[in-house]
Image (spheres, helix red, strand yellow):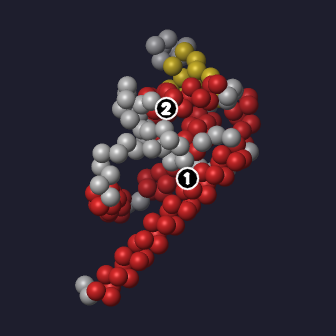
C-alpha cells in the first residue's frame, strides 16, 4: 500500500469514528432531553415493554450487560416510578421487572436508543463482518491503551462491570 492510500484510509477511518461519536452523542442528548432518562435506562424500559415483564437476568442478557449493572438501572427506574419488581408466581426465587403505567406511556413517546440501534445492527451482520468489526475495535482499544478501562455505558458515567464491582 502506498503512502497516499494509507493517508486516505486513515483520514476516512477518523471521519467514520467522528461520525459514530456524533450520532451516539446526539441520540444520547435527545433521549435525555425528551425523557429525562439516560440511554441505558430508556433501553431497559423498551426491552421490558417488549416483553411485558422480564427476569432481571434475561434483561441483562438482552442488553449485553452484567446483571449487577442492570440492577442499578432498575433501581433508578423504580425510584422514578417507571418500573417495579415482582416475584415470579411460578418460582418465588425469580424476580421479574415490569413497567408501571407511567413507564408504558414513556415508551410510547420515546426516541430510539443508540445502544439498541448498534446491537440490532451488529446482530444482523454476517459473522465474518462482525469479526472484522470486533478485531478492528480491539486494535483501536490497544492503540489507545484502553484495555484496562472499565466500559462506561453510552451516555452515562455508569460502568458495565461484573457482579459486585459496579458502583
Residue 164, how many percent across, how many down?
37, 25
Circle 2 is placed at which residue position? 70
Residue 107, how many percent across, how many down?
69, 40
**Residue 90 visible in the current orientation:** yes
Crowding around mark 1 (Cα neighbors within 10 Å: few <14, some 14 to 19, many 20+) is many
Image: 94 above or below 64: above
Image: 36 above or below 74: below
Task: Quadrant for residue 37, please give it.
Answer: top right
The residue located at (38%, 82%) in the rendering is 8
98 displayed left or right of 66: right
49 displayed left or right of 136: right
| Label 1 secondary element | helix
Q: Quadrant where the C terminus lies?
A: top left
Task: Quadrant for residue 102, please give it.
Answer: top right
Residue 60, how many percent across, how many down?
46, 34
Image: 13 above or below 145: below
Viewer-nearest residue: 83 or 89: 83
Q: CA distance from mark 2 to mark 1?
A: 17 Å
61 displayed left or right of 135: right
| Label 2 secondary element | helix
Viewer-nearest residue: 151 or 94: 151
Q: How many marks?
A: 2
Residue 77, how many percent across, how many down?
62, 30
Q: Earlier in the sequence, mark 2 or mark 1?
A: 2
The residue located at (45%, 66%) in the rendering is 17
Image: 100 above or below 65: above
The residue located at (32%, 52%) in the rendering is 146
Q: Quadrant where the N terminus lies?
A: bottom left
Circle 1 is placed at which residue position? 114
The residue located at (53%, 16%) in the rendering is 88
Crowding around mark 2 (Cα neighbors within 10 Å: few <14, some 14 to 19, many 20+) is many
Amino acid at each position: 500500500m502506498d503512502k497516499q492510500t494509507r493517508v486516505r484510509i486513515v483520514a476516512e477511518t477518523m471521519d467514520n469514528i467522528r461520525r459514530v461519536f456524533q450520532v451516539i452523542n446526539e441520540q444520547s442528548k435527545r433521549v435525555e432531553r425528551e425523557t429525562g432518562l439516560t440511554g441505558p435506562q430508556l433501553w431497559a424500559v423498551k426491552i421490558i415493554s417488549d416483553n411485558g415483564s422480564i427476569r432481571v437476568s434475561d434483561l441483562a442478557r438482552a442488553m449485553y450487560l452484567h446483571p449487577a449493572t442492570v440492577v442499578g438501572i432498575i433501581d433508578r427506574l423504580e425510584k422514578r416510578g417507571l418500573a417495579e419488581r415482582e416475584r415470579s408466581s411460578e418460582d418465588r426465587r425469580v424476580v421479574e421487572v415490569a413497567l408501571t403505567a407511567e413507564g408504558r406511556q414513556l415508551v410510547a413517546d420515546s426516541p430510539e436508543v443508540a445502544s439498541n440501534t448498534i446491537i440490532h445492527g451488529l446482530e444482523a451482520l454476517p459473522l465474518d463482518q462482525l469479526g472484522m468489526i470486533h478485531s478492528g475495535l480491539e486494535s483501536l482499544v490497544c492503540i489507545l491503551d484502553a484495555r484496562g478501562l472499565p466500559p462506561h455505558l453510552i451516555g452515562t458515567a455508569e460502568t458495565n462491570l461484573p457482579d459486585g464491582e459496579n458502583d
